[in-house]
Image (cartoon, grey):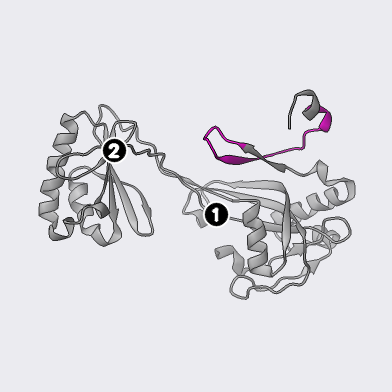
Amino acid sequence: MWWASRARWLFSALLDVGGVGLRARRRTASSGLEITGSCGGELQGELDRFGGISVHLSRHRTLHRLDAAAFRRLLQAAIQQWRAEGRIAAWLHIPILQSHFIAPAASLGFCFHHAEPHLSTLTLWLGEGPSRLPGYATHQVGVAGDTAVREVFEETGVKSEFRSLLSIRQQHRSPGAFGMSDMYLICRLQPRSFTINFCQQECLKCEWMDLESLARTKHTTPITSRVARLLLYGHREGFDKIDLSMEELPAVYTGLFYKLYHRGLPERYKAEMGTD
């Protein structure tokens, strides 16, 4: 992690033993494509619910015999058939070892949609008017909760428990996020152990610090100073005044759940409104 090479602090904040402040960053993304099944030309594809066709070259065992020119002819014939069938878009998933097929696909109008470590996805709009295909993820989003707990343990050796989300930093055009917008989530954790055994590949230094001293020092970043003061306020006046607590709720998708972060709801409102 690029930010882990700097010195980081674990600051005292919970009861008389302290809480742990941690920054946690992960990337998330989704293309929103849902597959059901169909085909096009000699290139076998799958029809999605929006009328698009998705072709995974890794499933075509004979393509390794083709050169770029032969693949272009095959793809061109498939495009003609997809247009005749009224397909609105084509998604072409190309494994990295078949990257020589990207150039002939591009010559037929395909453009990059996104790339993964071992796969490139190209798209071609076949419908009328401008493309209405969804763009790929354009933001990095910090991941809270379980990830913060795991990162603290892996990098410091300190076991902890998630208590709340404290704050969110939003940075547009972030150089560290390839010029995209970046959201950085800061969590409050409760320590379950206190012996530090930090990872020297991730951190230069780890130590427990007096929270009030950290809040007063001028030798730190603005975000660290502000969060330290926020924690000091919560420690003195009650963490309910600063916490965004987490509650797991059932999603509209059968069998799935999501985590909702919000200020605490008083018990009387839960009872009056029939909230669990």
Q: Residues within 10 Å of mark 2 (few under 14, many from 20)?
A: few
Write the residue at 33% across / 55% down.
119
Q: CA distance from mark 2 to mark 1?
A: 32 Å
The three-letter amino acid code for the residue at tag 1 is Arg
Whether residue 210 is visible, yes or no, is: yes
* Label located before the other in sequence (2 or 1): 1
In depth, the one of 236 and 147 nearer the eye is 147
Q: Is residue 267 one of those drawn in magenta?
A: yes
Q: Which mark is residue 14?
A: none
**Residue that label 2 marks:** 37
Where is 207 relative to 15, above or below? below
Image quadrant in which you'd find residue 90: top left
Q: The N terminus appears in which quarter of the rendering? A: bottom right
Local packing at callout 1 (Cα closer than 10 Å; few below 14, some 14-19, many 20+) is: few
* Residue at 18%, 44% in the rendered image: 108
The segment highlighted magenta reads 250-269
Front of the two marks 2 and 1:
2
